[in-house]
Amino acid sequence: MEMRFVSTGSYLPEQVVDNEFLSQIVDTSDEWISSRTGIRQRRVTIGEGTACMAAKAAAKAIARADIDPMDIDIIIVATMSPDNCLPNTACEVQAEVGAMNAVCFDLSAACSGFVYALNTAYSFIKAGIYKTALVIGSEVLSKMLDWNDRSTCVLFGDGAGAMIVQASETGIFESVLGSDGTRKDALTCASRYIRNPLVSKENTPSGEDTLDYVKMEGQEVFKFVVKTIPLTIQQVIEKAGCTQEDIRYYVLHQANQRILESVAKKLKEPIEKFPMNLDKYGNTSAASIPILLDKMNKKNMLNRGDKIILSGFGGGLTWGTTLIEW
Ligand code: COA
């Protein structure tokens, strides 16, 4: 059994935060941010949480697919910024969209999360276990940022993207996924520290009972992506028995324009094959690929039979590249 791509949906919070606004709260400038990253604006939630945005994106994908929510067999939400430790985000989406026959769980793989979630859905479908999956990436990164740290707060944004996929007789789906935990310190954000009657407060890393913020070794991440991602793209194209000429679009995680340009250069591909919207939304981690696909879908850029590369990369370190046929 193969998998077909039925519909997409996305949701972005209304509040726009531009580089000018950030230059009033940290020592930065529109010139620095846009020239180093390509980012000009991002959306920041002032109330809607990860599950709420996920459910809104999902509702749009379900409506466009014209399916009964009761026919959804599985909901996977890729996120590193859930609203709660429990319940999981997918169960909250299930209740909101009325998909009461679905099995629901979250998946955490940072900015590779959506590609990993899509591969998980594919594995269930390929094995004949489920027929219809709702796959979502949703993030509220704004709550994980230190808004006094100019090296990170300018990079990220909030949002959600969703996709309905279904079992199909035909289709192409080839992947190269990988992880390297030895480089886990390149991108971190601690959650709760170990805290119980047997552990004193002094043993928490900061010496107090606070939560942590995103920390990143920017150049380390940059070098890892530019080295790893072109290789995985070439590997996946070869696995699928295709050539680069067959690829209509490279839909990469929207981290940084310079990263995408470097990947394009290494592959000797025109930058026009790398759609981008990071100028408007910044880096939305697991949500960036499904948001971009939804925007492309709405502009009728995706045609049946198009071969598209999806590639996510980020904390862990994790990476995942998948060749799909739309
Ligand atoms: N505004 C102004 N100056 C800034 C700044 C900001 N927002 N952020 C950092 N700087 C400063 C630094 O303090 C440093 O100053 P110094 O030389 O006086 O110490 C200088 O700019 C250079 O910092 P550096 O970190 O070396 O910049 P860079 O050229 O590596 O660019 C990134 C930083 C984050 C844009 C770049 O490393 C990057 O894009 N990395 C990949 C990050 C990414 O996409 N991560 C997510 C992957 S999922």
Image (tube, helix red, strand yellow):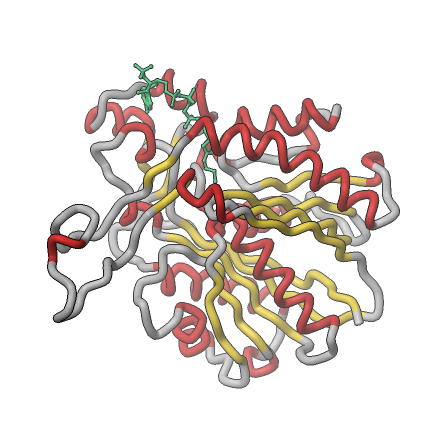
**Residue sitting nearer the eye, 35 or 41:** 35
Left or right: 300, with 280 as reference point: right
Residue 245, position in %: x, y? 84, 35
Left or right: 307, with 224 as reference point: right
Left or right: 49, with 274 as reference point: left
Q: Residue furthest right?
A: 241
**Up/down of 144 relative to 47, above or below:** above
**Up/down of 111 relative to 195, above or below:** above
Quadrant of the snapshot with the C terminus: bottom right
Q: Residue at x 62, y 60 (%)?
A: 118
Q: Residue at x 76, y 46 (%)?
A: 236
Q: Residue furthest bottom?
A: 101
**Up/down of 34 relative to 243, above or below:** above
Ligand 1, seen in the image, is in the quarter at top left
Q: Residue furthest front?
A: 198
Residue 320, position in %: x, y? 62, 49
Residue 121, position in %: x, y? 63, 67
Q: Residue at x 73, y 46 (%)?
A: 308
Quadrant of the snapshot with the N terminus: bottom right
Q: Write down the quadrant of residue 284 in the picture.
A: top left
**Residue sitting nearer the eye, 119 or 201:** 201
Q: Residue at x 78, y 47 (%)?
A: 307
